[in-house]
Image (cartoon, rainbow, N blue to C red):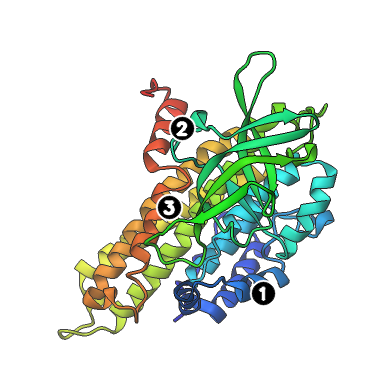
Amino acid sequence: MSPTPTPAPVLENEEHQALRAAVAALGRRYGRDYLARIAREGGHPDELWADAAKLGYLGVNLPEEYGGGGGGITELSIVLEELGAAGCPLLMMVVSPAICGTVITRFGTEQQKRTWLPGLADGSRTMAFGITEPDAGSNSHRITTTARRDGTDWILTGRKVFVSGVDTADATLVVGRTEDARTGRLKPCLFIVPRDAPGFTRSLIDMEIQAAEKQFELVLDEVRLPADALVGGGASHDEVVGGEDAGLLQLFAGLNPERVMTAAFAIGMGRHALAKAVEYAKTRQVWKETIGAHQAIAHPLAQAHIELELARLMMQKAAHLYDRGDDLAAGEAANMAKYAAGEACVRAVDQAVHTLGGNGLTREYGLAALIPASRVARIAPVSREMILNFVSHQTLGLPKSY
């Protein structure tokens, strides 16, 4: 079964259309059955990852001088959306090239760029991203993972939860906090922690969601790192892109692409579910006409399609703003895109399952597994309620309640 035909683009040029078509073709070669089998067997989508890398899709947003495609989050979101529409999204695309690749591109030292970007671009290396903590949730000010200096080294101590793909990643980009010598306050900093660093351990979190990418809890027990593990290097650079004083900038440089890519993930999933429901509604006959002729079936599916299209427009806007360097406007749009896509995805999946009735809960049609998966975009990387908080006080100017 092919995914929903891609509607005429509004914000996309011919190159973007060609990229969509090419990625869709790759996705059809694998599809939902491939990813479901990998998840059941406890493996990883190595074949799809390798093929996507070989075709240049994984590093399409990274600089050409480091082996990437020279594009931006606009192009990378197209890749993830189309793989999702085919039923085989690669979750690590959100983390490795989008978050980690973007942060290192914008803020890393030249040595960090040469060390990591070529591998992230060709898929031979991956990075995980650790920010969420057991007692912090959405409140990043409560992050307790701390980094202290010991000579020229750094010592990291703390815990992280719900970190994707740590079992296969070569390193994890960890958000910690260092003490400001002038004020004594803790400020965020980003560190590259190799997977084999002494004191760096992981444990699998038992999830109900069926996915190839597993979730882990991390423990950093006095992990010693060299000075160059800090993204941007030791002291702040003159151009204010690296070092201890740029951690907040670095963090948001990664979180905005994360929200755009989460939107792409959700839109792709919603399109995949909707395509299955539409195909079923066109062929399933109970009375004289197929069930798709009945407005009680047709209208909710049409509404789901409209909501997915509206979410895509906001995602395109957010990606465009980010790629042109308007971080402030991109932050607002990326949050809105993630919110809209998460809501649209949940409703599309729910309506798809309902359209198929009992068949929607069978393994044969593969929709039931999308019910919990579709909730992810509502919850992660930030809850819809926190996005509403952001819009209410940042956009509308209403007072904060927290």
Asked whether the viewer can see residue 133, the reply is: yes
Residue 83 to residue 221: above or below: below
Q: Nearer the viewer, residue 95 or 135?
A: 135
Q: Which amino acid does label 2 sit on?
A: Asn
Residue at x-position 72% and y-position 58%:
120
Q: In this view, does 396 lie to the left or right of 172?
A: left
Q: What residue type is labelled 1?
A: Asp
Mark nearest the camera among 1 and 2 is 2
- Numbered badge on residue 310: none
- Numbered badge on residue 139: 2
For mark 3, give the secondary structure.
helix
* Label 2 crowd bin: few (<14), some (14–19), many (20+), radius 10 Å: few
Residue at x-position 52% and y-position 50%:
315
Q: In which quarter of the image is residue 122?
A: bottom right
Mark nearest the camera among 3 and 2 is 2
For mark 2, give the secondary structure.
loop
- Residue 35 lies, in percent from the top left, at 49, 74
Q: Earlier in the sequence, mark 3 or mark 1?
A: 1
Asked whether the viewer can see residue 326, the reply is: no
Q: What residue type is labelled 3?
A: Ala
The alpha-carbon separation of the residues under discs 3 and 2 comes to 18 Å
The alpha-carbon separation of the residues under discs 3 and 1 comes to 26 Å
* Label 1 crowd bin: few (<14), some (14–19), many (20+), radius 10 Å: some
Q: Name the residue under label 3.
A: 377
Q: Which of marks 1 and 2 is nearer the N terminus?
A: 1
Residue 302 to residue 247: above or below: below
